[in-house]
Amino acid sequence: MIEELSKPKAALYTLGCRLNQAETAIIANSLKEKGFTIVDSAEIADLTVINTCTVTEQADSKCRQAVRQSIRKNPNTFVAVIGCYAQMSVEAILAIKGVDLIIGNEHKLNLTEYLGDMKKNGQAKIIHTPKISRDSFTIKYTGLYEKQTRANLKIQDGCNFVCSFCIIASARGPARSRVFKDILHEAQKFADNGHKEIVITGVNLGTYQYEDKKFIDVLCSLEKISGIERIRISSIEPTTVDKDLIDFMADSKKMCRYLHIPVQSGDNDILESMRRKHTAKDFINTIDYAYKKIPGIGIGTDVMVGYPGETDQQFINTKKMVVDLPIAYFHIFSYSDRKGTTAYNLKPKIDPQTKKARTRIMIDVGKRQKYAYYQSFLDKEVKVLFEEKVNGFWEGFTDNYMRIQAPAAEDLHNQIRMVRLDQVNEDKILGAIL
């Protein structure tokens, strides 16, 4: 206990995507290996690491706010700002008094190499490479997920698609893939640590390519790892979801029956302006094939409303398309200008009130379709991986991403149990453990 108290404390704060979460977990383990005690982000710590996001200007604002709050709460903490916002906005971060270290995306997983003696001297050290490497990569440390049941497995980074509204290709750099054996090594570590589900993460997963290995080869090899019972794919681009991937998912005993495929718009002219690689018909065909091939599959998507020049009819085209498809999970967001993207200069801009109205309409569509999807599973028996106890109920997820609540006196953390589904309660389904 005395030894534990003498260790320096590190608090880690993550903004943004699941890939950021995966990278924070890797950094946490590297710090633990170097003798740090990892504490909750709300605690006073010797080191504060803020892993940032820059997907929108609002995200930038949240990053600056998180940095300032950390410094106000603990003025003596050594503050390291890393990640996408650190890659794109070094000068803005330098303007915040109290920041000690700024690391862009190229080097952030090597954070421990740049900490030095962690003395605050009023001068931020900058580790930044404007042009990010295209080379394949390895990751030295395994992600630390001591409290979570699911572990994120990073296999890819960067993107070559460069959609008109997206800054991530600039922030993350070109598409590059993780060394194949290195992926399997971390996955085996997760299995050894008792994780039953892994979530495959990256910026553009389906473009994975290392030597002769492609994305489906990653899935085939992960399925052979003993102890891993579920393999979940995070967001994946429409043009990288082919029939071979869907067929593999249909036949697999471990692949989660879930695909999150961002469409953004159901209007071809808008998709072309967005520089998306798919048409509305391409997306429809992919969803139809997956739905027919995989019984009970959960399908999610991202929809952007209020893109520059989007007419009422083009919005209706999007709404009609998603209503006619078996999509159960929606992430709806309104377009926001992002300097550095080609869409920033497009006109006419859609007024805020129209964007809000369209967002409300699409959110309502999403709620109705999710409710109908949940209703279709009542009185059925499903497997649930339980995660935590909330208000007296154990909560967890099915492989097709339905959130389930069930009463139980025993500890069900990280347990997969059969549950009979009885009643839909807002965004959850109440059930009874069998």
Image (cartoon, rainbow, N blue to C red):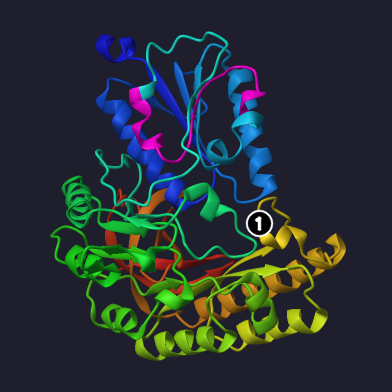
Magenta residue check for 103: yes
Q: In the rendered view of the protein, which quadrant contains the N terminus? A: top left
Magenta residue check for 209: no
User: In this orientation, which residue lies closer to the viewer: 60 or 211?
Assistant: 211
Is 140 rendered above or below residue 245? above
User: In this orientation, which residue lies closer to the viewer: 11 or 62?
Assistant: 62
User: In this orientation, which residue lies closer to the viewer: 363 or 115?
Assistant: 115
The image shows residue 23 at horizontal and vertical percentages of 39, 43
Magenta region: which residues?
A: 93-113
Q: In the rendered view of the protein, which quadrant contains the C terminus? A: bottom left
**Residue 12, image quadrant:** top left
Tag 1 secondary structure? loop
Is 317 rendered above or below residue 121? below
Q: Residue at x 60, y 72 (%)?
A: 275
The image shows residue 410 at horizontal and vertical percentages of 30, 50
Is residue 292 visible from the viewing direction of this image? Answer: yes
Is 26 rendered above or below residue 215? above
Is residue 398 visible from the viewing direction of this image? Answer: no
Q: Residues within 10 Å of mark 1 (few under 14, many from 20)?
A: some
Which three-letter amino acid code belongs to the residue tagged 1? Thr
Q: Is residue 421 left or right of residue 178?
A: right
The image shows residue 236 at horizontal and vertical percentages of 44, 68
Q: Residue at x 59, y 53 (%)?
A: 167
Q: Residue at x 20, y 63 (%)?
A: 222
**Residue 225, image quadrant:** bottom left
Q: Which residue is mark 1?
A: 341
The image shows residue 47 at horizontal and vertical percentages of 45, 20
